[in-house]
Amino acid sequence: MPKPAKREKKTIARNRAARHEYFVDETFEAGIELTGTEVKSLRERASQITDAFCLIRGGEAWLHGVHIHPYSNGGVWNVDPDRKRRLLLHRHQIDYLDGKLRTKGMALIPLELYFDERNRAKLCIGLCRGKKLYDKRTDMARRDADREIQRALKERSH
C-alpha cells in the first residue's frame, strides 16, 4: 500500500512586522494550550499575532497579546479572545530562553502561527534583538537594491 503524501504546514497567521523590527537570532517551535473553540476558530484562520510577545514566568512560557476571534458557532463555550495562553516547550528550552531573556535587549516574539503536518496548532517563536532605526534603513536600502537588480535582470532576459 503506498504511503500517503506528506502534508505540509498550513499557515494561520504570520507576524510580518517582526523581522522588520527585530534581528531574529534563534527560532523555536512551541505548542499552544488551547480550548476546543479556539482550535475551531483557528481553522477559520481567525487570529492576529502582530502585537504579541512571550514571557517566562514561574518556570512556564506564556503567550500574551494574541487575539483569537471567538468561534462563530461557539456560543457559551467561547473564552476571552485576548487571554494569555501557555506555551508548551521542553524544560531545557524554557531554562535556556529564561537565561537569554535576562540579557538586555532580548525579546521572545511570535513569528508564525500554523498547523503542522499532524494538524496540531504550533507557534514559531524567535529569540530577537531590537533593531535601531539605522538598521531598519540599511535593510530597506538593501531590499530596494535587490529589487532593482531583479528588475534589470528581468528586462535583460526579455
Image (tube, rainbow, N blue to C red):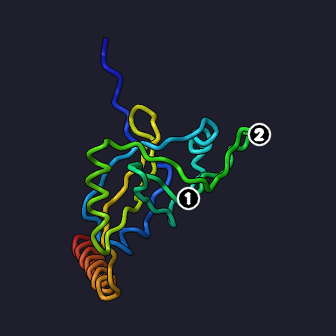
In front here: 1 or 60?
60
Q: Amino acid at mark 2?
A: Val
Q: Is residue 34 left or right of residue 131?
A: right
Given the current orientation, which residue lies at the most extreme front position? 58
Q: Is residue 33 left or right of residue 94?
A: right
In front here: 156 or 87?
87
Q: Is residue 116 above or below residue 20?
A: above
In front here: 18 or 108?
108
Q: Disc 2 versus disc 1: distance between alpha carbons?
A: 22 Å
Given the current orientation, which residue lies at the most extreme right position? 75
Residue at 30%, 56% (x, y): give it. 97
Residue at 32%, 86% (x, y): give it. 137
User: What percent of the width, then of the height, locates residue 158?
Assistant: 26, 71
Residue at 45%, 41% (x, y): give it. 115
**Mark closer to the observer (2, 1):** 2
Instruction: Identify the residue position indicated by label 1 in the image.
Output: 48
Q: Is residue 23 above or below residue 60?
A: below
Instruction: Identify the residue position indicated by label 2 in the image.
Output: 76
User: What percent of the width, then of the height, locates residue 157?
Assistant: 22, 70
Q: Is residue 28 left or right of residue 88?
A: left
Q: Which mark is residue 93?
A: none
Residue at 57%, 48% (x, y): give it. 45
Q: Amino acid at mark 1?
A: Gln
Instruction: Please tell me in which quadrant of the rendered image residue 89 appears.
Output: top left
Given the current orientation, which residue lies at the most extreme top position? 1
Instruction: Please tell me in which quadrant of the rendered image residue 77 appears.
Output: top right
In front here: 143 or 47?
47
SS class, disc 1: strand
The quadrant the N terminus occupies is: top left
Q: Is residue 82 left or right of residue 74?
A: left
SS class, disc 2: helix
User: What percent of the width, then of the height, locates residue 63?
Assistant: 48, 55
